[in-house]
Image (tube, helix red, strand yellow):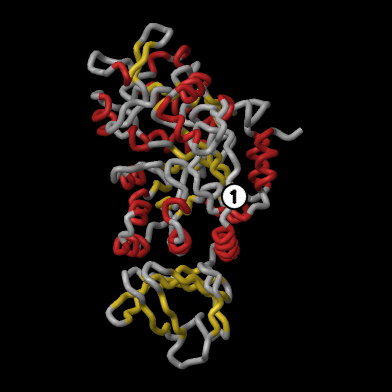
Amino acid sequence: MKEPLEFALSSLKDSLPFVWAEEIWLMGVWKNSPKSQSIARSMPELQPGFLAVKHPLFAEDVYGSPYSIYSYTPDPLVSANDNLTNVYKQIHEWNKKLILDFVPNHMAIDSPLIESDPHLFLIATDSVSAKNSFLHANGNRYVHGRDPYFDGWTDTIQWDFSNPDVEKKHIQILKEIAKVCDGVRCDMAMLLLPDVFEKTHEKKSVYDWKRVIDTVRQNYPNFKFYAEAYWGMENRLLDLGFDATYDKSFYDTLKENQFHFISQSLNENTKLSKIRFLENHDEERAKHQFGENSHTYFSLLSFSECILLFHEGQNLGLTKKIPVQMIQTDPENSNQVTEMYYKRAMKTITKRNSSSMFYQPNYIEFNGSAVFTRAIQTGDETELILWNETNKKVSGWIPFQEGIQFQSILTDLVSGVEFPQTKSEEGIYFKLNPNQAQWFIF
């Protein structure tokens, strides 16, 4: 008999994003907190977000935060067998790898670990405000999990990284997780860095990410560690052994239309150490945030040497951000133009393989304006992207070169428009509006 999650994955396995992806990150797999659920259902500030995606709203639509983890065992909605072995095997049968969440900064305020290991969590001092702490049934007042810039998450309890036993406990948890997946996405990984922890909680941390990662890899040498990271902490985490980190700065340049910095980032050789995205569970939907530019920006990301994070529903052009506490929402109609764009884009990207050649980005000058170009060669096909990073229209000719020869019709994968070509010794004629990209296959 199939587990609930196996049924869900079976319905997705033939979808284009699933076929295209190499790794599947499943959020909300671990056992959820009953206390987090009741807090989410009663917090007034969360209700507008819930009502924006579900009306009428019922209590059972809200399940609690997947980042307030009760225990690192599968939630009953995911598995009735208390393990993920069958799901892990199924993912591998589909030639994919499975990535799961590890939330290193905190646990749920009702986690059984507080009863069994009360000394591993941060006890509040007199300087900690009431809103950032809570009184546990064991008589201790503990600190909520938090970062240095905001008040605590009221459904969580903070690990005490000044206690060396916390690191040992994390290694134990991670070794258990590594039995049923290929890697972890570490939530807010920079909060464990000694200076960040001290800034937040005024205590010295003895936690060492490098030691944790190296110890886990003694038993699981190919296990991946991905870091959600901000505030310029990315390189520090890479140096400590993480395989890749979020590149939030790239996302921010897209939001702010900072074309020069977008171009600069696309020129970097990141060695697949950066995780780039147009949307995720913390950000607005790409279609809502970027509109039609979302097609241009995904095309640029497709020519970037990075780990590309793709969010469920992004290919449908959905615009409503779903709060992480919800498990039921009203259906939303897909955007047919966006859906067709992603079909073209993903069909092309899926053809790429380990022997595909990414040529260094180049700029072609036309009337004082630079057009960004980059090519990718896979077998006997060459992909070429052109992007106008200026605020004015640009037109000109791309000279014929190796892999780019005359074709009577060129189809732009971004817009889907076909361009009949007149043979000319000057090459291929193009015309681009500001911030427009065109993506061709030769």
Residue drawn at (68%, 52%), measured in percent from left and top? 14
Res. 293 in view: yes
Looking at this view, is 214 or 155 the one in front? 155
Residue closest to the far bottom: 425
Using the rendered view, name the quadrant where residue 363 is placed.
Answer: bottom left
Q: Taking 148 as reference, is 140 left or right? A: right
Q: Taking 326 as reference, is 139 left or right? A: left
Asked if residue 439 is positioned above or below residue 65 in the image, the reply reads below
Residue drawn at (65%, 38%), measured in percent from left and top? 87
Residue drawn at (55%, 47%), measured in percent from left and top? 312
Looking at this view, is 259 or 384 the one in front? 259
Q: Amino acid at mark 1?
A: Asn
Q: Residue 227, how many percent across, how many down?
A: 41, 42
Res. 301 in view: no
Residue closest to the far front: 56
Using the rendered view, name the quadrant where residue 315 is placed.
Answer: bottom right
Q: Taking 383 as reference, is 389 left or right? A: left
Residue drawn at (48%, 39%), measured in percent from left and top? 217
The quarter of the image holding the N terminus is top right
The 10 Å Cα crowd at callout 1, few under 14, some 14 to 19, many 20 or more, is: few
Residue to which mark 1 is pinned: 333
Indicate the secondary structure of the residue bearing disc 1: loop
Residue closest to the far right: 1
Q: Residue 395, how many percent across, how many down?
A: 38, 81
Q: Residue 403, how many percent across, how many down?
A: 51, 80
Using the rendered view, name the quadrant where residue 344 is placed.
Answer: bottom right
So how many labels did they put on this image?
1
Looking at this view, is 202 or 40 the one in front? 40
The quarter of the image holding the C terminus is bottom right
Q: Residue 277, how many percent across, how many down?
A: 44, 52
Asked if residue 218 is positioned above or below residue 302 in the image, the reply reads above
Asked if residue 388 is positioned above or below residue 18 in the image, the reply reads below
